[in-house]
Amino acid sequence: MSTKIRNSRKYKVNVIKIVIIGIYNVGKTTLLMRYINRDENEENNYPTTIGVEFERKRLLYKETRYDLEIFDTAGLERFQPATMSYVKRNDFIIFVFDNTEKSLEYILNNYKNELNSSKQETVFVLTKFDLLNSREEKDSLIKNIQKKLKDNLHEIPKLYVIDNTPKSINIINTIFMNITKNHHKSIELNNKSKENEEIETIKLSIENFKKNGISSVEEEKCCLF
């Protein structure tokens, strides 16, 4: 009789909140659903997002389970105030724009202050890159984007370029995996900082203890009658 041994190992759990922002029809929902469903079919057309849609993805990285809570926001102008509230409530922001000038201008015009003052990490994703006809057009677009980001932002964010071909699924996976890695690194640095603070507190307590004339418990005992 064989017995199945279940893996009862428990992992630490962390939640990463991510919001996807951009003007309408740039491919925000397509980006999200291709990641959630590992969808390599570039022919899928998703309905326009009304308000905010929510998806969850679970990852395991370095003995830690991460629940990615991803908010897909509407790109229509009338939903912009509601979208703004999600900027402050999430850990990471993915700004999505396509090869049209207005899509990047929408982000820089509406979120420039948040980009320059926000504590959240941000990445930019350029979509529909394959719709440009020539290498010259593509190179010119990238240079123009980099210039606008440099002129408007204090720090240049990471820029990913994807298209509607099946190979882009690897880039999409990389985007969310890098977000997870960065969050994990941030947690590690925060924990290390707390450990150092505790060590310094202990050292300070010992120094204060010695300054009061008692260097050890044994010395205190020797003087008692």
Image (spheres, grey):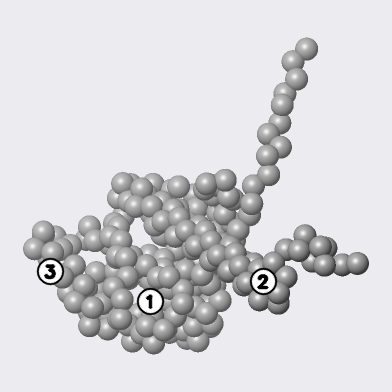
Taking the spot 66% from the left edge, 68% from the top edge, the residue there is 206
Q: Residue furthest right?
A: 225
Q: Compared with residue 100, is residue 174 higher up or lower down, i.e. above or below? A: above
Q: Amino acid at mark 3?
A: Ser
- Secondary structure beneath dot 3 equals helix
Q: Tag on residue 186?
A: none
- Mark 2, mark 3: which one is toward the viewer? 2
Q: Which residue is mark 3?
A: 140
Q: Earlier in the sequence, mark 2 or mark 1?
A: 1
Q: Residue furthest left?
A: 136
In the displayed structure image, the side of residue 123 where residue 88 appears, left or right:
right
Measured as percent of width and height from the top left, residue 104 is found at 29, 77
Residue 221 seen in this snapshot:
yes
Q: Which residue is mark 1?
A: 23
Taking the spot 67% from the left edge, 71% from the top edge, the residue there is 210
In the displayed structure image, the side of residue 9 where residue 122 appears, left or right:
left
- Secondary structure beneath dot 2 equals helix
Q: Where is the N terminus found, in terms of image quarters?
A: top right
Q: Which residue is mark 2?
A: 210
Measured as percent of width and height from the top left, residue 34 is found at 43, 53
- Secondary structure beneath dot 1 equals loop
Viewer-side residue, 197 vs 125: 197
Q: Where is the C terminus found, in terms of image quarters?
A: bottom right
Q: CA distance from mark 2 to mark 3?
A: 68 Å
Q: Amino acid at mark 1?
A: Ile
Q: CA distance from mark 2 to mark 1?
A: 64 Å
Q: Amino acid at mark 2?
A: Lys
Q: Earlier in the sequence, mark 2 or mark 3?
A: 3
Q: Earlier in the sequence, mark 1 or mark 3?
A: 1
Taking the spot 52% from the left edge, 48% from the top edge, the residue there is 61
Viewer-side residue, 15 vs 69: 15
